Image (tube, coloured by chain):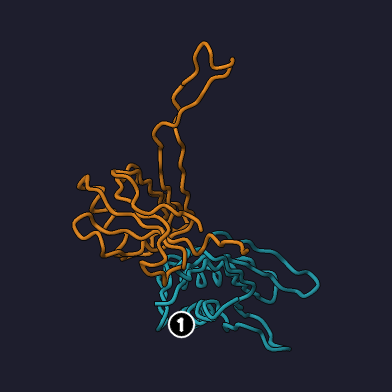
Chain colours: A cyan, B orange
Amino acid sequence: MSDLADAVHQAFFASLQAAVTRATVYTIVPDKTLPPVVVIAESSAEQVGGKNSDAERHDVAVRSILAGTSKRELHLLMEQVKGALHNRQLTLAGFWLSRVVMTSSDDSRDVDEGAVIGTQNFTVFVQRA
Amino acid sequence: MALRLGNNYIVFVATAAAPTVFSMIGGQQGGEFNDARGSIDGGHKTSGGVNLKLPANRDIAIDLSFVADLPDTGYSIVQTAYNSNLNVVVQIRDAGAASVVGDAVFTCLMGQFQRNISMPLNGVVSGQLRFEPAAAPTLELVID
């Protein structure tokens, strides 16, 4: 990964923190932190620029975790996450980011942990300004 | 001996009106130089049962693919020329984006005969261009 990955994470974090009220947003969840949390989870990058340009496509997973069994509460939280990122043109000094697109999402239940988990996958293109 | 990396081969263009002022077309990805020589049948009754081939004219084409990283001076040159049916001077240089005129390996006045633009969902805009000669090349190393 490169400093472009850091730029994407900074921009995602700022937008999520401003828009998500149903949970605390993290890039890495500290030990023993209780849900509800939203975490910028796995990400991958691919070079998409030309021979003379450094542009990357980043695919980022954002995970929402709630204690309990309420899928409805989870979906409301995921709607806030979607509103913070999907179709939004994020900004960060020194970088250009494309409009963010949510490409897929899913939800599941972790019976052992007593939690419901939602994952939303986003795609964004980034290059230095 | 050393291998040649395709990333270092970059296409530059200049207008026919200012043929020494070159600009790089930004966002270049693939590039293909195609050169096929035609043949003239020279076989005859006493050519030993062999169809003799004489060299005819060549078909040369440069195919270029790029991602739209705009605004870009080089792309503006080819877009204006294509829309106005004008030729451009196409130069291939082999020292990357920082190439200078001395790095040229191919130079030719060319017409632009194809322009395809792709605008995919959740993807970057990309395009393909095709150039074919309007005059004989003035420099023809291509790779060296």
The number of numbered badges drawn on the structure is 1
Q: Quadrant of the N terminus of chain A?
A: bottom right
Q: Nearer the viewer, residue B13 or A28?
A: B13
Q: Is residue B96 left or right of residue B86?
A: right
* Left or right of residue B98: residue B19: left
x, y (%) of residue B144? 51, 58
Q: Tell me if mark 1 has few (under 14), some (14-19) or many (20+) residues whose alpha carbon lies within 10 angstroms of its own.
A: few
Outermost residue on the top side: it is: B45
Can residue A41 be spotted in the picture? yes
**Residue farthest toward the right in the current orientation of the protein:** A112
Horizontal side, residue A45 vs residue B136: left or right = right
Q: Position of residue A37 (x, y in %)?
A: 62, 80
Q: Position of residue A27 (x, y in %)?
A: 60, 82
> What residue sits 66% from the left and 84% below the top?
A29
Q: Amino acid at mark 1?
A: Ala
Q: Quadrant of residue B16?
A: bottom left
Q: Nearer the viewer, residue A61 or A52?
A: A52
Where on the picture, by quarter, is residue A122? bottom right
Residue occupying the point 55% across, 69% down:
A78
Residue A14 placement (x, y as % from top left): 48, 82
Q: Label 1 marks which chain's residue? A: A
- Which residue corresponds to mark 1? A18
